[in-house]
Amino acid sequence: MFEGKKLLVTGASSGIGAHLALHFAGLGARVAVAARRATALEAMAEKQPNLAPITLDVGDPDSVRTGVAAAVEALGGLDGLINNAGIGLTGRASDVTEADWSAVIDVNLSGVFRVAQAAARAMGQRGGTIVNMASILGFGVQPGVAAYAAAKAGVVHLTRALALEWARQGIRVNAIAPGYFPTDMNRDYLESPDGQAYLKAIPMRRFGRLEDLEGPMELLLSPKGAYITGITLPVDGGHLCRAL
Ligand code: NDP
């Protein structure tokens, strides 16, 4: 189903993005892997010839324009986007600096919009699929994540707005809201006693494994999900429906 498909994955130099890029490349897709750390992307592409490294900063509109254009040229078109780049920020709301607030909103919300817009322009009337990376923190909150949670809630709503506007040109826009998956962004915290305490709030009593995201992403990216647009699909071991 993904053989020969042309995909762009942002935030592909580590964690969820790297895992999904390698997964779809393994299924025969040609995948442009985009992030700021060019050396990490090049190392991935040396091992998996279906990957094309693209240096791109989602916080910089010019970099998004040129990066998405380079991806489209390298792939010979664009069928799908995994709009995944993001940064974490923790800290009490009363202490968050203006610069940190702006950085999180710029990368995690405006960056998602910038890349989606550039991808949709490249897809044009041929259609395509876009999957944004939200978070269960786009639906629920906990102390210390105000900017991150606000940005991810923005991604949930942006996903609906873009789905509405682009449905008539055959572009489906959905999102995945992962629960807690240990990656560079949060591994130290999740392994700490405070992080381990979250396990009690997850009905399945385990953190996510990167492979848990493969099936949901395949559904939303492929014709198997042809009548699905505008949704955000939680992949969280039941975390959002925990008992009060
Ligand atoms: P990682 O830190 O491993 O990956 C983040 C990726 O985003 C990296 O490849 C990084 O690459 C890239 N990135 C960060 N800033 C930019 C930028 N300005 N321009 C381009 N790329 C950028 O974390 P995860 O894999 O966990 O995170 C991936 C996504 O999943 C994020 O959106 C995150 O919010 C979301 N998520 C993660 C959860 C988890 O539990 N892990 C839970 C819910 C959502 P580089 O530094 O090379 O630019």
Image: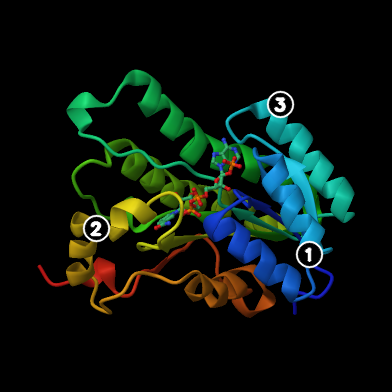
Question: Residue 90: where, in percent of width, then height?
Answer: 29, 39
Above or below for 4 versus 195: below
Residue 228 appears in view? yes
Q: In the image, 12: left or right of 154?
A: right
Question: Residue 223: where, in percent of width, then height?
Answer: 68, 76
Residue at the left extreme?
A: 244
Q: Which of marks 3 and 1 is nearer the N terminus?
A: 1
Q: Which amino acid does label 1 sit on?
A: Gln
Q: Earlier in the sequence, mark 2 or mark 3?
A: 3
The quarter of the image holding the N terminus is bottom right
User: Dots 2 and 3: beta carbons under 8 Å?
Assistant: no
Above or below for 196 versus 135: below
The quarter of the image holding the C terminus is bottom left
Q: Which of marks 2 and 3 is in front?
A: 2
Q: Can you tell me whether the CB of the residue at mark 2 lies under 8 Å from the nearest atom of ligand 1?
A: no
Above or below for 65 versus 152: above
Q: Can you tell me whether the CB of the residue at mark 3 lies under 8 Å from the nearest atom of ligand 1?
A: no
Secondary structure at numbered mark 2:
helix
Q: Name the residue under label 1.
A: 48
Secondary structure at numbered mark 3:
helix
Q: Which amino acid does label 2 sit on?
A: Gly
Q: Mark 2 points at which residue?
A: 195
Alpha carbon of mark 2 to alpha carbon of mark 3: how far?
38 Å
Q: Mark 3 points at which residue?
A: 62
